[in-house]
Image: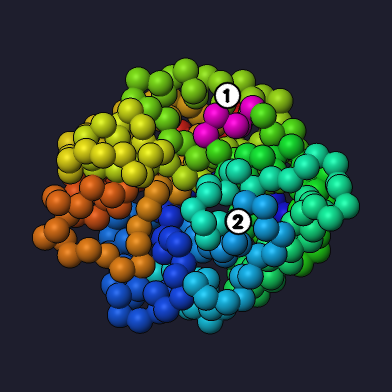
Amino acid sequence: MQDMNTWSETVNGMTWGWTGIRGTWQGMDAEHSMSELKAVGVNWIALALAAVQETAQSTTIPFREAPTVTDDEVRWAIRNAKRRGMKVCLKPVVNCANGTWRAHIGFFRQEVPGEPSWADWFKSYAEFILHYAVIAEQEGCEMLCVGCEMVQADSREAEWRSLIAEVRKVYDGLITYNCDKYQEDRVNWWDAVDIISSSGYYPTGQWEIQLDRIENALKRWNKPFLFMETGCPSRTGSSLRPNDWSLEGVPSEEEQAHWYEEMFAACSRRDWMRGYMLWDWPAKLYDSSEASANDDYCIYGKQAMNTVRDFYAERLSKPEEAGEVK
């Protein structure tokens, strides 16, 4: 294991393949998507897949069945990314079939006979994460993300520490947890992971305030930090609510590009910022001729693609500017 106090990676990353729908992580479309992604200048890729439990109070995570991608698809994506020179973070995530956001998965603080419990859920969740931890180890993934935006579950410190300890028995790479926006200073078990990461969906005009808050939190833990997710739809109004994928508006490449410019400028002034896994890049891309009408997060063919490509190229030419936690 590397010394995390001196870990100096420059992570120019992108999240690929969400939500990991069975049948989409192999074939010509997926091959084309990865080929186009490499042209943006990424050196890291987060392969994000979802298993779907029925509701926020369900305690079974059926990750071996559709719609979750198959293990063969996961291995194909890892190998394809590595063949293109990208380092890989495998990111298994849990969703709810009824549309409830995973942050609201939760149970009684103390177990009650006959009611669903944290113990039952974490037992299933551990099986889910450990399954992909083994694949990550076998395929040489450099990083594993053990959870994403589980706000209600964040307080279950003992369960997370136990899970991470079990993961380390089968996986030797870097471990991170992707907390939600505004939660960087509310997780009390950051010492258990190697890298602190979060979803950086912060509104325009708020970057300095939020980065100050994150910086103060990092001083307690002395760990590297990156945005495991961050991005903004190309849609009017989205720069003020970049986390809201359902916000109504009209397509706007300009608003998306300006948001990225502001975010990169603010983060570049922080020597503890290790990098970004931008959100997101689908396994099947829209045609580049449709980019101006597309109002989602993907930057393919949009003004923000040039912004990201230029910024990533500059970072790789000056990697020493991204330093350790002070």
Q: Residues within 10 Å of mark 2 (few under 14, many from 20)?
A: some
**Label 1 secondary element:** helix
The answer to whether 35 is drawn above or below residue 160 in the figure is: below
The answer to whether 210 is drawn above or below residue 2 in the figure is: above
**On the image, which quarter does residue 179 sit in?**
top right
Q: Is residue 137 visible?
A: no
Q: Which label's residue is closer to the chain start, 2 or 1?
A: 2
Magenta-colored segment: predominant secondary structure: loop
Amino acid beneath label 2: Thr
The answer to whether 205 is drawn above or below residue 309 in the figure is: above
Point out the stretch of residues depicted in magenta: 181-185
On-image quarter of the C terminus: top right
Q: Is residue 81 left or right of residue 125?
A: left
Q: Is residue 202 inside the magenta stretch?
A: no
Q: How many numbered circles does the render carry?
A: 2
Which residue is most to the left?
A: 289
Query: In percent of the image, x 66 and y 36: which residue is there?
Result: 223
What number is the disc on residue 119? none
Q: Is residue 120 left or right of residue 293?
A: right
Q: Position of residue 293 (x, y in %)?
A: 15, 51
Q: Residues within 10 Å of mark 1 (few under 14, many from 20)?
A: some
Q: Closer to us: mark 2 or mark 1?
A: 2
Residue holding disc 1: 215
**Colour scheme of the picture:** rainbow
Q: Position of residue 67 (x, y in %)?
A: 49, 72
Amino acid beneath label 1: Glu
**On the image, which quarter does residue 285 sit in?**
bottom left
Residue holding disc 2: 55
